[in-house]
Structures are given as C-alpha cells and as structure tokens.
Image (tube, coloured by chain):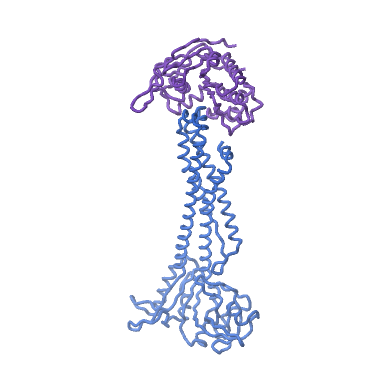
Chain colours: A purple, B blue
Amino acid sequence: MIEQSHSTDGKEVIELRGIKKIYPVGDQEVAALAGINLDIRQGEFAALMGPSGSGKSTLMNILGCLDRPSVGSYKLDGKEVANLSDDELAVTRNKYIGFVFQNFNLLNTISSLDNVALPLVYAGISKKERAERAMHYLDMVGLSDRADHMPNELSGGQKQRVAIARALVNDPQIIMADEPTGNLDTKSTKEILDIFENMHKMGRTIILVTHEPDVAMRASRQLLVRDGLITRDEGKGVVLDVV
Amino acid sequence: MAFKALLANKMRSLLTMLGIIIGVGAVIVMVALGTGVKESITNSIASLGSNMLIVSPAATNNGGVRGAAGSNTKLKYDDAKAIKDRIKNIDYVSPSVASSYQIVNGRSNWNSSVQGVTPEYMAIRSLEVVSGSYISINDMDKRNRVAVLGATVATELFGTDNPVGSNIRINNAPYMVIGVLSKKGQSAMGQDQDDVVYIPLTTAQERLLGITHVQSINIQVSTPEKMTQVQSEITNLLRSRHRIREGGDDDFKVNNLTSLMELVDQQTAMITALLGSIAAISLVVGGIGIMNIMMVSVTERTREIGIRKALGATFKAIMTQFLIESVVISVVGGFIGVIAAFGICFIINSLGLEMSGSPFKTSITVLPIVVSFIFSVGIGLFFGIYPARKAAKLDPIEALRYE
C-alpha cells in the first residue's frame, strides 16, 4: 500500500554530532541543547520524550530543519544541513521532512485535497500530478470520500489523517510528528497510532515527540531529553523487516 | 490561490478596491473634463475663422502726437486687393468697415453693428445663409443698398416672419434684405455673433460712412504652417505700398488668432493637469488602503504563512503570493475604475451641457486610461512589497506558534 522508495539497509539517515543551541538571556547565555549526539537509522520509529523546558522542542525544530544549531554538525541523509540558508532549509523541509502537528495546522480556506497537495505546490509539481498524488495519499488514510470537504467539516481524527497524508505526499525521508495525538480522543489516538505503526512496518523513518509514556511505548525506540542532553536511549537500531 | 484568498474576504477586498476604483475613475474623468473644456474653447475660437490674420490700421502719429488705435486712414480696399494678388498661400482676403446704427423696420427698431464686407467674408467666417442669398460681386460693383441680417437682428425686427425681400432703414436710407444667416451663437468673448447686419463694403464706404479707407482686412491663410511666413510677407508688402522708410513705424498691425489659441492651450493644459493631479492623490490614498489591508492580512494569516513555510515555501514563494494578491486588487480595481469613468463621462455627455453656446462633451483620451491603469498596478506592487516582505521574512517556528 505504501511505497517506500528509500533504501532500508539500516544506514544512518540522521547524524547529530555535538549539537548545541545557545540563547542569549540578558548578558548570560543559556544552552537549550548542550551537545547532543544522536544517530537515527533508516526505518526507525523513535519517540522523543522529556518534560517541558528540557530542550525537546528545540531538538525537534533542529531535526525538522525549522531551526539551525548554534554549534555542531547535522547530517541529513548524508548531507550537512547545519549551516543552510533559510531558503535552502525550506527546500530541505519540502523534500526530506513531512510534518504532523498537534493542532493539525491545515489551511481552513482550502479543501482537504488541496491541503494534502500543498507541499507539491512548493516542489514545483504540475497541477494534474498534484491532484493525483494527493488523492492517492488521501485514499491511503481512508479519506478519499472527504477530498472536497473543508477542514472545519472534519472531525479531529479525520483532520489528523489529512495532515498525515500531507506529510507523506512528497515521499519524505522522515516523518516528524509533534504530539500528534495531543488533541485527540482515545479512539482517534488509537487510529492515528495504528497508522504510524503501519508506516513503520512499511519502512518509514518516524520521529514522534510526546509526553505520554503509553504513546511512546508504541515506538520501537525511546529517547529521553533532559537539560539539553539525551539521558536515556532504549531500543536503538530496531528496524522492522519490510513486509 | 490569490483569487481564493481574496474571495474569502469579499467585503474587505471590495472596500480596498474602492480606493483604486475611485482613484483611477477620478483621474480619467477629470482629464476627460479638462480635455472637453479645451476642445469646447478651441471650437469657439475656430468658429471665429481658422487660420485667420487680421490687418488693422495703427494709431496716427502727427509729429509725435499719437491718435487712438485704428485712427489711421491709410489702409485701403486696394491694399486688400494687392495682398490677394501678390501673396501666395492665401485663400481669402476680406476688407471690412463697421459702425453701429439704429436699424428700422416699420415700427420695430434695433441698434446693431453694420458691417461693410466683401463676398469672401462669408467663407472666412464660415457663415451660412438660411434663407435668401449672400452679398454678390455685382452688389459690390454697383454699391447696391442690400443687407444680410444676422439671426438676432432678423428676430428682433421681423419676429418669425421671413425678412427676405423686405426693406429696412439704416441711417434713414432704405436697404433691401437679401438674406438671413444661420445662428452662430456667442463668441468665446461672450459676444452675440448673430447681432450684426452685413452690407456691401463699397456701399458702406461711400453711401453710409462716407470714407475711403477700410477698418480691417481679414485674411484666411491656406495652412496654419504658413501663418508666420504670410504674416511677414503682408507686412513687407504694406510697408512698401505705404512708402514707409527703413526703420519707420508700421501704420498698420497684423494680428493672428494663434496666440489666442496658444494661450487657451496653455491654460486648459494647466487646469487639466491640476484636476488630474488632485485625482491622482486619491489614487495614492487608494494604494495606502491596499497596504493597510495587506498588513492586516499578513498578521491575520501568520499561522498560514508558518504552515506554508514548514511545508517548504521559500521567501520568494510567500512574497509572490502576497504581491499577487495586492496586484490583483489594484488591477481589478483599476479595470472597474476605467469602466466607471466611461459610465460617468457618458452620463455627463448625455446631460447635453452647453458651454459658451457650443455643446460641451467630455473627451476620453487613451493616455490617461493607460497611465492611470499602469499607475494603479504600480501602486499595487509598491504598496504590496512591504507587507509581502514582512510575510516572507516571518520565522516559521514563531509563525506556527502564533494564535
């Protein structure tokens, strides 16, 4: 069902070396990240946990190429991205990363189908192909009958499924999910996590940020961030065989 | 995409456009009004006779004591004939004399200007006879007591009757009415051009006024380009005929209407520019309206911008999106403005206004349409750049966090 174009030989898709993020506060400097080393392999399903203020969000932003580290090296699919310009980061996000947010972040003025197709607009894909590919991924999350619906006509679970379709539509290396179940009821949470698990089985690399332990346990690897460092790392390198 | 965003806020987009609509419409209508005024005045002047030169006697000068303008009596009918025979590029030469007389028909009477003219005068002044005929060469040669009445005089003396064939008395001598002229209306100077009686020049000189000179010679030049040349040739010819020595003052003056035309051109151009620039201010105000609404729109859509950036929109992509929106507002507004201007001009024209006797029409020209339309697109771009830059420079993390 899901095409996985990337190799699944277990190579490192993310390599962080000595990543620091330092913010000036008054005349002092505060390190949100204090030197993180992290490798994530192709096909891993990693959960990122940590209390608020731990540096979890900062790490998430850097991993998602929304922000740059102050110091350190970040190799994404073997390419150094730590010092890219804003526009180069935008292109990298478009090509390598699919985002799923806690509050869905769909555009309310356009249909589900157009929302799913949005990353393809910035990838320069033709209108016809955009519609075809967006429809394919909407079908995959079981919402092809809601293609013409506006986001505010959908339930929370449905919105998040549209968002997942949008994250997958440009076939990215990594899915970054920031508290994807934070605004959902138990039933929808289960549905969404099933989809993630399914994607994992298909060989997708997924990074899931959450503060709920039972959600984190659905992932194959659990990372705990505290005071700007990774203090616990369990289940490293678990890559499921591609079905 | 831009259209979708604008349609999502129909009322707001419409109000924003209104600034541009009024601006573009006002510029075009104002310039059309100015051009209309100019054409109307130009037509009035042209009705005096186009390409016209007027030779008139200068003041007398007896050993330094100067008389009134026109008091000189050296300008003769023969001078007019000489001008016609010797100088090229001339269509008509018409000498004339004029004086005011009480004109009587039975029990009605009317004071009017009696002008002694030659048959050519009719062509020079573009006069038309509505009934009867005009003064002929035969009338000139025989010094016939015949008269052609202007429309006002005919009405005052004869009411609705046809005066042709009747006799009137000028200075107690009988004259037969041989024709009546069509209405010419007021001149640009506010004179009633129909309050006049024409009689043959020779009759006026010898039988009515008892003089041998003429008071003016009207000359119609064949093309406007030859005006200056003909003017200097006439000056030279008359100086030699009047035996004026080198360095001596002319005993005549040659005037033309082009200087009057130029004055009118200058003044109406100034009025048009003034009206146009006042209207242009409203166009700029409209542009500021666009900027204002785009700023609001950027703030309102911060989150949308954050989402688009997270999904891979570059600086250029966001910039383009917002610029297109403001340009679409100004282009659509400009287009509606042009249509509105046509509508308003059509209404003004159909009101049938009159200005100094001739019908007044607004005159829409291509230039203000093109200029104000391009200007409005430029305004959309110019005032759209700042908000669009603001949107494009937003930090995606901040923008995504915006509530």
Q: How many marks?
A: 0
- Tell me the quarter of the image containing the C terminus of chain A: top right
In the image, farthest residue toward the bottom: B172
**Residue B256 picture location, percent across and down:** 45, 70
Q: What residue lies at 63% left-to-right and 80% top-to-bottom?
A: B159
Q: Quadrant of the N terminus of chain A?
A: top right
**Is residue B167 depicted above or below A238 in this figure?**
below
Q: Is residue B165 left or right of residue A210?
A: right
Instruction: Answer with left or right where residue B107 lies relative to residue B115.
Output: right
> Which is nearer the eye, B236 or A172?
A172
Residue B96, image x, y percentages: 50, 79
The image shows residue B32 at horizontal and vertical percentages of 53, 58
Classify B187 as above or below B15. Answer: below
Q: Nearer the viewer, residue A148 or A156?
A: A156
Above/below status of B99 relative to B10: below
Closer-to-camera residue (A142/B231) = A142
Horizontal side of residue B343 vs B27, given as left or right: right
Q: Is residue B3 above or below residue B231?
A: above
Which residue occupies the foreground of this view, B129 or B264? B264
x%, y% of residue A75? Answer: 44, 18
